Each structure stands twice: as structure tokens, then as C-alpha cells.
Amino acid sequence: MRRRVILLGPPGSGKGTIAAHLVSEHGFRHLSTGNWFRSEVKQGTHIGQVAKVYLDRGELVPDKIVLELMEEWLGSVPSQDGFLLDGFPRTTVQAEAFDDWLAEHQMPVEAVIFCDANVELIIERAAGRRVCAKCGRVYHVRNNPPKITGVCDDCGMPLIIRDDDTESVMRKRFGIYEQQTRPLVNYYRKQGKLSTVDAGVPAKQQIEATVRALTA
Ligand code: AMP
């Protein structure tokens, strides 16, 4: 199975759900930059205070801050473990800087899973999305509900609605995705690393398609 993997796609396209499965069933080293920023905000760190302004507006945190954070994380992960990235890279600047870093360390990206979804699906998904207040695990009230309503299966903590899951913020985040992140689909397609997974199918099928792409 390929172990240096990027999950690419608009907010709410199932990346978090796929990541949770790959971590629990296949032992991937996972980083969600969004979860990282939210945790920095919660802890009130300096980075968190800066990032909060962008998160609240649904805008991207500046590349420089994101790249510093990534370098710190990658430096802390044993290279043989690989990585599963969800929410990074999000701009061409980030992708190029990341490729340079990986080339230097001789550990290129092996696969990019593109979770393809249109804006209406994303809005519908976001309306039902709930996340664990503690571990960040993602649920959907209809498509991927927890065993007990409102409670995380893993840690028993309450599920919450993210501040940036409102329809207007989601539309804005989708627009930013189209403009800044979608060009990465071609970037990785040209490298021959892209597999497309339909985000419109149930979570289970989306996960199966991802596992097939990573083992093909
Ligand atoms: P996510 O949970 O991936 O949707 O990310 C939530 C928010 O965190 C985004 O709307 C951005 O404000 C910020 N963020 C996460 N990852 C990145 C990134 N790679 N570059 C810039 N901002 C990011």
C-alpha cells in the first residue's frame, strides 16, 4: 500500500472520514492541518491567535505559517512511517515547497486521492456535519451517524457543529478552494499520482475506492 499520501478535495468532501479509516485500519500517520490550527486556537498559542482570524473568515492561513508548521511536523515523523495529509497542500506555493522538501529527503508523494464534489453536495454535507469536540472525528447525521446521537464513538465526548460550517462560510470556502486549491488537481495529475474518488457516494464506498487506489 502506498504510504505517502495526500487527500485533496473541497471542504466537506469526505477527507476526514477517509483519513479516520486509514489511521484506524491501516496505521497511517495522519495530519489534518485544519485540526491542527483549531487545536492551536483552542490552546490560545501565538499561531492560534493569528490563525483564528483566517479560520473564522473561512480564508486560508498564509503559506509561510503553514509551511513552518508542516516542516516542524515532518521533522518529527520517522521517514519510514510515511504520511497521510488532509488539508495540505492547499495552494501551488505550498505544493511546490512541499515537493522541494520531499525531494531533498528522498521521500516523494506516492499517491493523491482527489475527492471530487460539487458545491451543492458540499453545502448539503456541511449542514449535517458534526465533529467530536475532543478528537475531531467527523460524522454526518444521516450518511455517517455515530452509534449514539450526539456522542463520539471513540471518546464519548459531545459532537459539535464547526463554526465555519454555516452555509455562507461554506460557499466562501468552496470559492477559495476552486480558486486556490483546485489547480493542484492538474499539478498532481501531471505527475501521474492522481486518483479520483466520487465524493457523492456513501462514505463506505468512498473509503473502499480509496483503499483500492492506494493498493493498485
Ligand atoms: P479544514 O479543516 O481542512 O477545512 O481547514 C479549516 C481551516 O484551516 C481552513 O479554512 C483554513 O483557514 C485553515 N487551513 C487548514 N489547512 C490549511 C492550509 N494548508 N493552508 C492554509 N490554510 C489552511
Image (cartoon, grey):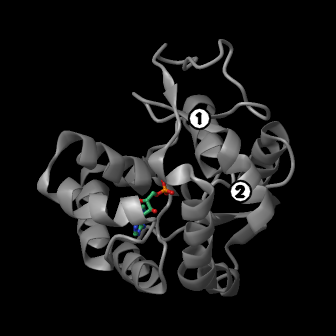
154 shown above or below 97: above
Give the spatial CA distance, label 1 vs label 2.
Answer: 13 Å
User: Which corner quadrant of the figure contains ligand 1?
Assistant: bottom left
Q: Nearer the viewer, residue 29 or 198?
A: 198
**Quick one: label 2, few (<14), some, or many (20+) residues within 10 Å?**
many
Residue 83 % position (x, y): 46, 53
Q: Residue at x 23, y 59 (%)?
A: 72
What amino acid is found at the position of numbered circle 2 in the picture?
Ile
In the shown orientation, is residue 132 left or right of residue 98? right
Say whether residue 196 is visible. no
Q: Which residue is mark 2?
A: 123
Q: Quadrant of the C terminus?
A: bottom right
Labels 1 and 2 touching (C-beta < 8 A): no
Q: Residue at x 49, y 43 (%)?
A: 162
Q: Nearer the viewer, residue 35 or 51?
A: 51
Disc assigned to residue 130: 1
Q: Quadrant of residue 19?
A: top right
13 shown above or below 136: below
Q: Nearer the viewer, residue 147 or 15?
A: 147
* Outermost residue, left side: 46
In the shown orientation, is residue 210 left or right of residue 135? right
Disc assigned to residue 189: none
Kind of element beneath mark 2: helix
Circle nearer the N terminus (1, 2): 2
193 shown above or below 45: below
What amino acid is found at the position of numbered circle 1 in the picture?
Arg
Q: Quadrant of residue 189?
A: bottom right
Residue 126 % position (x, y): 66, 49
Residue 15 % position (x, y): 62, 51
Q: Is mark 2 within 8 Å of ligand 1?
A: no
